[in-house]
Amino acid sequence: MNIIDLTHIINEDMPVFPGTEKPILENVCTLEKNGFREKLMTMYSHTGTHMDAPGHMLVGGKLLDNFDVSTFIGPAVVIDCSNVNHEIGIDILKSYESEIRACDFVLLYTGWDKKWGTDDYFVDFPALTLEACLYIIEFDIKGIGVDTISIDLFESKSFEIHKNVLDSEMVIIENLKNLEELIGKRHIFSGLPLKIEKADGSPIRAVAYSEK
Amino acid sequence: MNIIDLTHIINEDMPVFPGTEKPILENVCTLEKNGFREKLMTMYSHTGTHMDAPGHMLVGGKLLDNFDVSTFIGPAVVIDCSNVNHEIGIDILKSYESEIRACDFVLLYTGWDKKWGTDDYFVDFPALTLEACLYIIEFDIKGIGVDTISIDLFESKSFEIHKNVLDSEMVIIENLKNLEELIGKRHIFSGLPLKIEKADGSPIRAVAYSEK
């Protein structure tokens, strides 16, 4: 079995959604002073590769600690969206219909993870159209993942893709990386969040277990 | 397959190692004010159910981001230490020798997780003797996990068990729970840390995948 790391590194220089703040990772205990190293970490609940709970945007929406842990793991399909023009439409999804039906997670590969750390990461990335979103949430899946900063277009003010997905009691995973390694391969996605009380979201260490 | 959650919840009232501080989970963005919920989380790198890297205590010791992600996952054996008297000695380990040889992780079940949230959690829990520690680190394993606040006795000042385990380039997992559900069952342990740069440690969402 192959384990593929789908997670960006967390550091003080990492990209964050505009309007939020970068993490602070302070070395408060050191070998010299304390005999051990320990950091004090300050970060937003939607930092880096992370998961959104329905309660992130919806009144009465479930929080991550309201889900059974099995919600965060399951077979996934990666949809190759690297050649779409800004919009991920219903046609590309329909071409994966049988795979989506067999899976718990749908992961949208755009290749934008290669732009991580540059201004281009925030610009012109593709996102689901409303029609495509309404198509995908009819399937019995646990969540949708993207390798971009948001599942909505960057310029979206309504967050309608977020809200439709979350209203279906699915989770959203954003800022994934390395999805291209999973195209056409059977794999299990694992996106376990920290067990934070009343978690609207959480950074995760996302991985996939795939065939060699 | 059965997924068992081995993780204590993270909240502002949780027990933390004396001398450190409890997490702060501040609801900085709300549906009413911002249209979405988001928390600002402040916590130490060794909060709750967490992993220690060799660099936690050793000069030049590896940090969690120096390990391949496969280091954090593998077959485990739970050793039932619920009847020992303060010390986990070499004899009990020897009775599991063949199981340890077949595994990547050794998890020590003491039952102290039931005392989580009470003062008793910090008192009189069993820990490995130095002899037992030196025995176990001779095996080709990735890490050792405990359901107590420390792999050393609470009153230890030398942290000799920590240092011997970490010096063998193994990781340590502390504050696990629910290990009794895995006694005698074949299972895969998953203790994926956050992908924090230069991580001396990290909170984890520990789970086990077991036969039904």
Image (spheres, coloured by chain):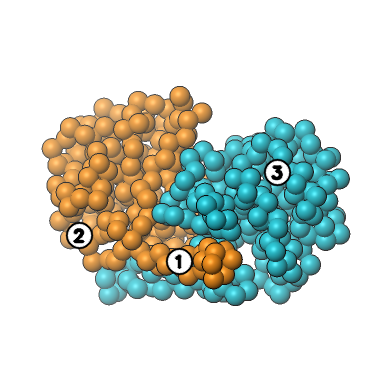
Chain colours: A cyan, B orange
Task: Work out whether residue B171 or residue A196 is closer to the camera in this orientation and state it.
Answer: A196
Q: Are marks 1 and 3 on the same chain?
A: no
Q: In the rendered structure, find residue A113 and report the number of the disc placed on it.
A: none
Query: Residue at image x 33%, y 29%?
Result: B183
Task: Tell me the subunit letter for badge 3.
Answer: A
Task: Tell me the subunit letter for badge 1.
Answer: B
Q: Are marks 2 and 1 on the same chain?
A: yes
Query: Residue at image x 27%, y 75%?
Result: A33
Using residue A63 as the reference point, say whether residue B24 is left or right of it. left
Q: Secondary structure at mark 3?
A: loop
Category of crowding for the residue at label 3, using alpha-carbon neighbours closer than 10 angstroms: few (below 14), some (14–19), many (at least 20): some
Q: Amino acid at mark 2?
A: Ser
Residue A156, picture quadrant: bottom right
Q: Identify residue for label 1.
A: B27
Q: Amino acid at mark 3?
A: Ile
As measured in the structure, the alpha-carbon distance from the residue carrying label 1 to the one carrying label 3 is: 29 Å
Task: Work out whether residue A148 or residue A134 is closer to the camera in this orientation and state it.
Answer: A134
Q: Amino acid at mark 1?
A: Asn
Using residue B22 as the reference point, say whether residue A135 is left or right of it. right
Q: Position of residue B156 (x, y in %)?
A: 17, 56
Q: Position of residue A84 (x, y in %)?
A: 85, 55
Q: Identify residue for label 3.
A: A137
Q: Nearer the viewer, mark 2 or mark 3?
A: 3
